[in-house]
Amino acid sequence: MPELAEVEFYRRRWHEVAAGRRITVVQTHDHKKTYRSAPAAPLRNALTGARLLDSATAAKQMLFRFSGGAWLGVHLGMSGELTVHPVNYIQGKHDHLVLRTSRHTLVFSDPRMFGKLEFARGPDAPAWWTRIAPALLSTEFTADTVAAFLRRRAKAPIKAVLLMQERFPGIGNWMADEILWRAALHPRRAAGSLTPAETRVLRRECRQVARQALRAIAGQGGPLPPDLNVNIPNTWLFNHRWTDGGLCPRTHVPLIREEIGGRTTCWSPGRQRLKS
DNA sequence: CCAATTGTTATTTA
DNA sequence: ATAAATAACAATTG
């Protein structure tokens, strides 16, 4: 489920109730898959009694900083979620990490276990965090770097290229489709076939979708929305892409769904043509 | 039983 | 050697 804006929504959900608070109890389900890069025991020891000081998101990753130089990384994978419950919450089957404060229970759940937890100690943020590619909304996400990347991936369909985190951090399946739809680019277009003008439009829509999604989904600049997706306008492709018989909100032509680059892809034949 | 799922990575193919 | 395609991971739902 989670892409850049959903990840920010979940981070805020934990942060708003727990920032500045002490973790009194830590519970884990020590599943190898979830804890594949960080054993659960040291994580439990370090977080018990620690205070949540700060948190941040980058791409699809979250980093929570605790007192005592403890860093907790979360990647939600396909089905991960961060939730907040009352103090009497009982750990469920798919709850891999449960953090209790005097007022709330924070839960990381992930039935499919494509997600993972990271843990590090030290004065500085861990290396995996600082290695994440520059954000879509940063000044380093330039037209030139995008154009150079498309040249290197010239033969791959543009849809597959947008999913590459090394250049498009935080973009997932729905964001990629939304961006291509707005840019009026067919998802099967070879990345190397885009004209300079099309490349500039693509970059602009990457930033626009990131900005608008953060505002609509994570409530950036305002209160946290009660749920994901409640504020997404029907003018976006998003609200039509999974409904059978869905229509393009701009051309009112039936949308198409096909597998491209290994993922189900939705586009509007009214707007997005293969040959331009 | 079959197919589907908003992600990533290892392996195979070209 | 590099890039692109494919399989695999696990659980649940329709």
Image (cartoon, coloured by chain):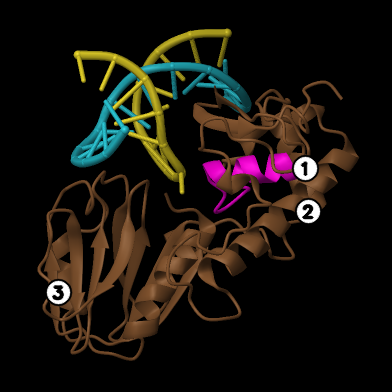
Chain colours: A brown, B yellow, C cyan
Q: In the rendered structure, which amino acid carries the disc numbered 2?
A: Arg
Image location of residue A147, percent across then percent down: 79, 42
Residue matched to label 1: A183
**Label 3 crowd (10 A; few <14 / some 14-19 / many >=20):** some
Looking at the image, is A74 positioned above or below residue A187? below
Q: Decide: marks 2, 1 in contact (CB < 8 A)?
A: yes
Q: Residue at x 78, y 53 (%)?
A: A204
Q: Is residue A258 above or below residue A19?
A: above
Type of the residue with mark 3: Val
- Residue extent of the magenta highlight: A165-182
Q: In whole angstroms, how far apart are the C-alphas of marks 3 and 1?
A: 46 Å
First of labels 3, 1 by sequence position: 3
Q: Quadrant of residue A181?
A: top right
Q: Is A137 on the left or on the right of A175, as rendered?
A: right
Q: Is residue A167 magenta?
A: yes
Q: Residue at x 56, y 64 (%)?
A: A231
Whether discs 2 and 1 lie on one chain: the answer is yes
Q: Amino acid at mark 1?
A: Ala
* Direction from residue A264 to residue A145 in the image, left or right: right
Q: Is residue A132 magenta?
A: no
Look at the image and tell me whether residue A131 can be seen.
Answer: no
